[in-house]
């Protein structure tokens, strides 16, 4: 039996978070009562005409530059004709042969190192409305249509068939999401549909050129379903070939419940979209200076930032990768470093207690009540020995809950570390007097007893005694 | 003379001299509509109460001594493919027979801002597809000069209303001659402005790259006033041009001395009815006698204009008309099995024959495997046709031709022969393909029926057309002859 390799290409749809829709002034806000975010243009009323929202073009260029694409000087919109009730005009305004950008790439980290995935093209188009069924699509007596989403701007990003495993496909999508989030043009929420993806997959015996017949998988609304569906589909195709069967070129849908892909329609029923340059929209002539300005306004991208963290801050690659995973977290980290130049201490704290509490409460870093300045002050208090690391955890939990400054909490609760020798000696004496047994044990050579005694000192001082000092003084007394 | 056959500028003078109130003026026009529209059938919808309310507002302005604009209080007929807020807009189609737009076209807003009153919605060929008004789903409009004949199309209702005094001015739309040909048949002035001069926002699209809204009037001065009111950039229409609007009445000078006028020989060839050719030649001689230089010239790609036009128009139409599916507005067929069945039943019941024919042709032209041979090739030929005009306009200020090869034909005469019908657009379609302005002006009669002279100008050079047309009008009296009704 030959070894097979999987060939995958992805088409990602990203909703741009411009205030207004792509061809009219209706709001793009998610939610809202059905058919309230609409106007004659996005409802496709007779006589209404589209006018391109310049902000959409700017956002598309911004995303394209972040994905290392070449921006076209001349681009146009085309009509993709097909009938579906969620499409107000029964054509979608999209871009066919002259997309806004082409020839980009994205790097992903695989087990075998960094891999460059080609991006064929990036184009702008309008989103469709949404069908609302009573029950399921097959049993519903009627369908309702909500056009709030119709005309929301999308960019479609098409990758080259460079991905070789479901795992790589997931990594590509995650990386794409990270990069797009950095550019700020979308919030990339898969659960709200602002990031969607279709996958083209085929298999071929290892070492052979050319491509096998591909299937297109739709309805992938999480990274998990992307990876799972591709794993299922690759196996299905291999089994089919091994059994002497043939792969049919078709569209399949992922059934999350059943954990399998199901045939939707085969190529014989494929649409002829009858593309036509949209005569209602004039071609786009992209000003080079505008592109340069957009390029200059881009933030440092995650790959560059990660490398800089290793080089400039001496952080381990692992820390650097986690800290730069979102722009907001990286910005937060850098604000902390500005106030307290100890990158590793900050990184430990962010990746430890901060991330744990964020995850626990389902809060984004942008919604965190602990400001970078306050986190830096806390770390400064530890560094100076004002509070112990253990006390700091309690203080931090309170900072996280209420947003107070570390100093305030420490002062209010009297949590300042006791480093006064005389005070600690008094406690040590008391502890030794009350615990003759463990003292005997220690003297008999049972080192473990010391730990117990230190614990008692800490307890008696309500955790405020400087633990190193307590340790030292105990040894001296014993 | 019948009062309602006066021009807008004459009525304006009477309004400001308080010889008549705007309300009386409008009532008089509506009385005329009541008297003649049973014979003519110019209107699908009449909006008397709206118009009278608008007129009373104008009267208040006059009483308060405010300055009113030249079209204030003047009743205007609007072709029924131009959206009017709260007033049913059908495009002459059964499929939109219950459609009441929630918004007005930019041109309607501009006319209302100028104080005009809306007399009603004028009949047309369904979705502006036709040259005779016989394709309307509602009624057949008749030519005021001979009610057994067509008024032309597709803006036949608008032309007939103005010719019959059932409106003072009117708006039409012109995709391949739909303003100029009915203007010629009905003996009124009709103009298709430069593509992009007038906003298309709110015009129910037939072929977006060719459609243009324009005026019907009883003389050239009114035409300039109408264009003044409706032209100019509209941010709601990407294809509307950002150009500096001018006062077109400034071009109304009785002087064509030294003007160079070209006559493309292809437009005077054997397809043209000899009587029409005779009238048009006489009009050209008239301009020559007034000091213009008139010469024959050539537009060599003219023979390809008709197929090019029909491929482009139909391809765009097949896509533009896809939205009429019964989901959001318009009629919806009953008793459908599922959504696809609903689409098919709605469209087959809602559209007429000619519309279906054009949708099918356009769909075919855009299909995989045919696109390059048909649509793409048509776009290339369109460029050649444009270049023909560019060359001609290097030498000539204007081009002259007949508007239509014939005078108004009889109702039913060509309805079963689409190709014959399409040929009646032969002199007008190239203007749309090139995007240049075209104007039809009454230039005489053949067999008792009006004949139009077509003036074609450079892009955005409506001014020169107005000057030549005005000079011709000042030295002839065809615009002062009216049909007897
Ligand atoms: Zn809208």
Image: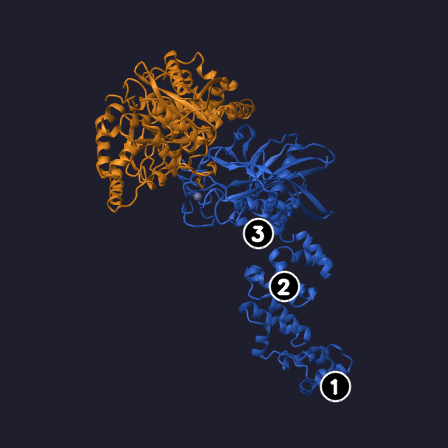
- Residues at badges 2 and 3 in contact (C-beta under 8 Å)? no
Q: Position of residue A393 (x, y in %)?
A: 62, 70
How many other residues sit within 10 Å of disc 3, few (<14), some (14-19) or many (≥20)? some
Report the residue marked by disc 2: A335
Q: Colour of chain A?
A: blue
Ligand 1 within 8 Å of the CB at mark 3: no
Report the residue marked by disc 3: A184
Chain bearing mark 1 = A
Quadrant containing the N terminus of chain A in the rendered view: top right
Residue A466's disc is none
Q: Earlier in the sequence, mark 1 or mark 2?
A: 2
Q: Earlier in the sequence, mark 2 or mark 3?
A: 3
Q: Position of residue B31 (x, y in %)?
A: 21, 31
Dot 1: element: helix
Report the residue marked by disc 1: A477
Q: CA distance from mark 3 to mark 1?
A: 62 Å
Kindly identify the residue that appears in the image at 69 percent across and 55 percent down: A306
Where B295 sits versus A372, above or below? above
Judge left or right: residue A307 versus residue B450. right
Quadrant containing the C terminus of chain A in the rendered view: bottom right
Q: Colour of chain B?
A: orange
């Amino acid at each position: 039996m030959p070894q097979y390799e999987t060939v995958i290409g992805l088409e990602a749809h990203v909703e741009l978070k411009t205030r207004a829709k792509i061809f009219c002034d209706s709001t793009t806000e998610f939610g809202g009562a059905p058919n309230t975010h609409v106007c004659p243009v996005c409802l496709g009323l007779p006589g209404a005409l589209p006018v391109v929202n310049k902000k959409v073009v700017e956002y598309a260029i911004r995303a394209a530059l972040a994905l290392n694409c070449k921006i076209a000087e001349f681009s146009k919109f085309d009509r993709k004709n097909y009938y579906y009730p969620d499409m107000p005009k029964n054509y979608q305004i999209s871009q066919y042969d002259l997309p806004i950008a082409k020839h980009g790439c994205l790097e992903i980290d695989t087990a075998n190192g960094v891999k460059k995935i080609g991006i064929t093209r990036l184009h702008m188009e309008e989103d469709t409305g949404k069908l609302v069924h009573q029950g399921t699509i097959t049993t519903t007596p009627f369908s309702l249509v909500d056009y709030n989403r119709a005309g929301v701007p999308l960019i479609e990003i098409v990758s080259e068939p460079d991905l070789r495993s479901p795992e790589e496909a997931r990594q590509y999508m995650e990386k794409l999401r990270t990069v797009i989030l950095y550019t700020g043009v979308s919030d990339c929420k898969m659960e709200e549909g602002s990031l969607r993806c279709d996958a083209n997959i085929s298999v071929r015996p290892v070492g052979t050129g050319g491509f096998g017949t591909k299937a297109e998988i739709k309805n992938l609304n999480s990274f998990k379903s992307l990876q799972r569906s591709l794993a299922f589909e690759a196996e299905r195709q291999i089994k089919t070939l091994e059994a002497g069967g043939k792969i049919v070129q078709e569209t399949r849908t992922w059934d999350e419940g059943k954990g399998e892909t199901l045939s939707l329609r085969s190529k014989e029923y494929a649409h002829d979209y009858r593309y036509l340059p949209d005569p209602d929209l004039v071609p786009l002539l992209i000003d080079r200076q505008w592109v340069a300005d957009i390029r200059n306004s881009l933030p440092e991208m995650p790959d560059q930032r990660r490398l800089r963290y290793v080089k400039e801050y001496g952080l381990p690659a692992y820390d650097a990768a986690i800290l730069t995973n979102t722009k907001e977290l990286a910005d937060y980290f850098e604000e902390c470093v500005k106030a307290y130049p100890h990158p590793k201490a900050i990184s430990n704290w962010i990746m430890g207690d901060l991330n744990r509490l964020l995850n626990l409460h389902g809060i984004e870093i942008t919604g965190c009540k602990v400001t970078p300045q306050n986190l830096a002050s806390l770390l400064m208090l530890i560094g100076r020995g004002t509070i112990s690391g253990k006390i700091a955890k309690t203080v931090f939990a309170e900072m996280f809950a209420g947003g107070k400054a570390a100093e305030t909490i420490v002062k209010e609760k009297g949590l300042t570390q006791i480093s006064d020798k005389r005070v600690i000696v008094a406690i040590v004496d008391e502890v030794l007097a009350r615990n003759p047994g463990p003292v005997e044990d220690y003297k008999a050579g049972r080192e473990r007893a010391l730990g117990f005694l230190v614990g008692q000192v800490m307890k008696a001082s309500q955790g405020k005694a400087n633990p190193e000092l307590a340790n030292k003084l105990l040894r001296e007394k014993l | 003379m019948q009062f309602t056959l006066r021009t807008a500028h004459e009525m304006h003078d009477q309004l400001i001299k308080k010889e008549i109130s705007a309300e009386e003026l409008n009532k008089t026009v509506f009385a005329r509509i009541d008297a003649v529209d049973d014979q003519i059938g110019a209107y699908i919808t009449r909006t008397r109460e709206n118009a009278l309310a608008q007129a009373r507002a104008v009267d208040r302005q006059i009483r308060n001594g405010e300055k009113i604009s030249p079209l204030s209080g003047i009743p205007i007929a609007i072709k029924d493919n131009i959206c009017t807020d709260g007033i049913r807009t059908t495009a002459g189609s059964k499929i939109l027979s219950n459609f009441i737009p929630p918004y007005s076209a930019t041109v309607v807003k501009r006319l209302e801002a100028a104080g005009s009153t809306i007399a009603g919605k004028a009949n047309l060929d369904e979705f502006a597809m036709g040259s005779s008004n016989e394709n309307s789903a509602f009624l057949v409009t008749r030519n005021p000069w001979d009610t057994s004949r067509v008024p032309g199309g597709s803006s036949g209702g608008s032309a007939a209303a103005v010719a019959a005094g059932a409106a003072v001015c009117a708006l039409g739309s012109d995709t391949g001659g739909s303003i100029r040909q009915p203007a010629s048949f009905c003996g009124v002035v009709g103009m298709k402005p430069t593509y992009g001069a007038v906003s298309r926002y709110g015009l129910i699209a037939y072929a977006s790259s060719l459609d243009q809204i324009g005026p019907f009037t009883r003389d050239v001065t009114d035409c300039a006033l109408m264009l003044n009111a409706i032209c100019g950039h509209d941010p709601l229409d990407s294809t509307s041009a950002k150009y500096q609007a001018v006062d077109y009445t400034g071009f109304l000078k009785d002087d064509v001395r030294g003007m160079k006028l070209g006559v493309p020989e292809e437009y005077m060839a054997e397809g043209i009815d000899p009587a029409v050719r005779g009238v048009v030649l006489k009009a050209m001689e008239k301009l020559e006698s007034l000091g213009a230089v008139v010469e024959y010239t050539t537009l060599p790609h003219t023979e390809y204009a008709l197929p090019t036009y029909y491929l482009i128009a139909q391809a765009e139409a097949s896509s533009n008309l896809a939205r009429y599916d019964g989901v959001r507005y318009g009629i919806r067929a009953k008793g459908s099995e599922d959504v696809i069945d609903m689409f098919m039943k709605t469209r087959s019941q809602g559209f007429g024959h000619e519309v279906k024919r054009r949708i099918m042709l356009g769909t075919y032209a855009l299909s995989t495997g045919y696109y390059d041979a048909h649509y793409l090739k048509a776009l290339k030929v369109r460029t050649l046709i444009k270049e023909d005009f560019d060359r001609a306009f290097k030498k000539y200020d204007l081009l002259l031709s007949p508007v239509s090869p014939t005078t108004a034909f009889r109702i039913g005469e060509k309805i079963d022969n689409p190709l014959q019908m399409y040929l009646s657009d032969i002199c007008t379609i190239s203007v749309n393909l090139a995007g240049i302005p075209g104007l039809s002006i009454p230039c005489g009669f053949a067999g008792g029926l009006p004949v139009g002279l077509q003036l074609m100008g450079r892009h955005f050079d409506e001014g020169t057309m107005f000057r030549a047309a005005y000079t011709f009008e000042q030295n002839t009296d065809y615009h002062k002859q009216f049909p007897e009704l």
